[in-house]
Image (spheres, rainbow, N blue to C red):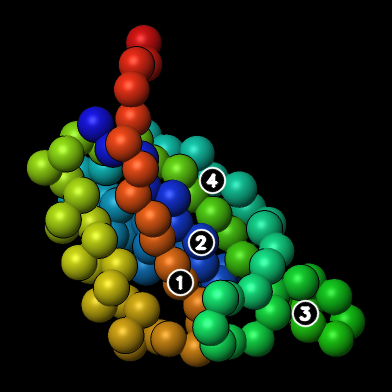
Amino acid sequence: MKAIFIVFGQTLNEPVLDILDSEGVRGFTRWEETFGRGSYKGEPHYGSHAWPTKNSSILAVVQDYQVDGVMNRLRSLNQKAEAQGLNAFVWPIEGGL
């Protein structure tokens, strides 16, 4: 199993959820408001007067075979909406109930 951690500008909420649904990812945890800035470019998402935009984050634990489909579709979405901010990371998962 793998964990996919997705951070995205809140305007991408529906497209990200659509990707998870279409790839058969049922379970996840979402944080509605997360704040930060990209490593290389993009404006900060601080939810402040000066930087009013916000991020959301999702952590989904998926089967290994689901990773490529989700990540490829997230890459495609990012290319279409790069200014909105989207990044995803994959981690191995051990254990679980």
Regarding residue 58, the answer to whether it shows in the image is yes
Task: Quadrant for residue 46, please give it.
Answer: bottom right
Which three-letter amino acid code belongs to the residue tagged 4? Arg
Q: Earlier in the sequence, mark 2 or mark 3?
A: 2
Which three-letter amino acid code belongs to the residue tagged 1? Leu
Secondary structure beneath dot 2 equals strand
Q: Earlier in the sequence, mark 4 or mark 3?
A: 4
Regarding residue 11, the answer to whether it shows in the image is no
Residue pointed to by mark 2: 7
Residue pointed to by mark 3: 52
Secondary structure beneath dot 3 equals loop
User: Where residue 58 sits in the image (x, y, percent)?
Assistant: 48, 49
Which three-letter amino acid code belongs to the residue tagged 2? Val
Q: Residue at x 61, y 48 (%)?
A: 31
Give the vertical position of 22 relative to 24 (above or below).
below
Residue pointed to by mark 1: 86
Task: Quadrant for residue 26, please give it.
Answer: top left
Q: Nearer the viewer, mark 2 or mark 4?
A: 2
Q: Residue at x 51, y 77 (%)?
A: 85
Residue 30, label in figure: 4
Secondary structure beneath dot 4 equals strand
User: Where residue 82 sits in the image (x, y, percent)?
Assistant: 43, 86
Q: Do the residues under discs 2 and 1 have CB atoms within 8 angstroms? A: yes
